Image (cartoon, rainbow, N blue to C red):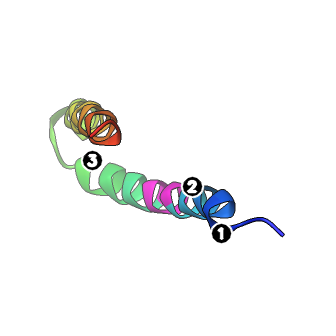
Amino acid sequence: MQPISVVLPFGFGVADGAIISLVLTEALAIGGELPRGGKAKLAAGAAVDVLVMVRLAFV
């Protein structure tokens, strides 16, 4: 039997994927009202998010 610490990252990955898909769908729907469909702001926000998360991963 595997300890929970081995299986836990997979559960977090599934939950993370679900949240990303829900947020991305909603962001594209709301961003359609912004200039250029809001894709530039969505890309900038995603880039900042990745930078922050990578930084926090090594703290």
Say what secondary structure mark 1 lies in.
helix
Q: Which residue is mark 3?
A: 32
Tell me how far mark 3 sits from mark 1, CA to CA.
Answer: 42 Å
Name which residue type carries label 3: Gly
Question: x and y percent of residue 36 in the render?
Answer: 22, 31
Of the residues under marks 1 and 2, which one precedes in the sequence?
1
Q: Earlier in the sequence, mark 3 or mark 2?
A: 2
Query: Alpha-carbon neighbours of circle 1 within 10 Å: few (<14), some, or many (≥20)?
Result: few
Q: Secondary structure at mark 2?
A: helix
Residue 39: which disc?
Answer: none
- Badge 3 marks a residue whose secondary structure is loop
| Tag 2 residue | 13
Point out the frontmost of discs 1 and 2. Answer: 1
Identified by mark 1, the residue type is: Ile
The boundaries of the magenta stretch are 16-21
The answer to whether 53 is drawn above or below residue 33 in the figure is: above
The reply to whether residue 38 is visible in this rendering is yes
Q: Say if 7 sits above or below 33 in the image.
A: below
Tag 2: Cα neighbours inside 10 Å, few (<14), some, or many (≥20)?
few
Q: Please name whichever residue, 35 or 9, is drawn nearer the observer in this view of the structure.
A: 9
Q: Position of residue 33 (x, y in %)?
A: 19, 49
